[in-house]
Image (cartoon, rainbow, N blue to C red):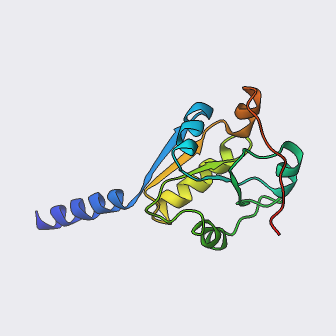
Amino acid sequence: MIKHLALALIWFFALAANGEVIDIDSAELTRLQASGVPLVDIRTEGEWKTTGVIAGSRPLTYFDENGQSNPPQWLEKLKTVAKPDQPVILICRSGKRSSAATQFLSEKAGYKTVYNVSKGLNAWVGEGRQTVPFVPAK
């Protein structure tokens, strides 16, 4: 009995340790960004240059052009934008890469609330919403 209770408690706290990943659309992205939740564009620099970026977003590549990532290194950069106790929005082209990155933040990095733009920049642009030219940081 005590063993079962201990296992149940471990399972409960393991679940509680995970944050919440919430899929959102472009309209919700606009609302959240207006309320001050930071938007991180995890696409590659080539993608930013080709399509532009959403005004106010923070470009921070998660997967490089070869599909490789370095989550610990990326996380250190992300923490300058949003700490684990602060909400953050991630966007990529279609929502697949940002889904992987939001899972990492929620399950491994201790982020409490992470928003994933589920259809990515494709939906944003497809709805006629504007982007601005990407300007590299100096």
* Nearer the observer, 31 or 44: 31
Q: Residue visible at 71% across and 65% down?
A: 69
Quadrant including the N terminus = bottom left
Does residue 83 appear to the left or right of 125 in the view shown? left
x and y percentages locating residue 15 in the rendered image: 35, 56
Does residue 40 appear to the left or right of 115 in the view shown? right
* Nearer the observer, 49 or 5: 49
Residue farthest left in this picture: 1
Q: Residue visible at 59% across and 33% down?
A: 25
x and y percentages locating residue 8 in the rendered image: 22, 59
Q: Residue visible at 88% across and 50% down?
A: 49
Does residue 98 appear to the left or right of 35 in the view shown? right
x and y percentages locating residue 118 in the rendered image: 61, 38
Residue 45 falls in image quadrant: bottom right
Relative to 25, is 70 above or below? below
Residue farthest top in this picture: 127
Q: Looking at the image, how many numbered discs can be counted on the residues?
A: 0
Quadrant including the C terminus = bottom right
* Nearer the observer, 2 or 23: 23
x and y percentages locating residue 68 in the rendered image: 75, 63
* Nearer the observer, 87 or 108: 87
Q: Residue visible at 56% across and 42% down?
A: 34
Relative to 8, is 23 above or below? above
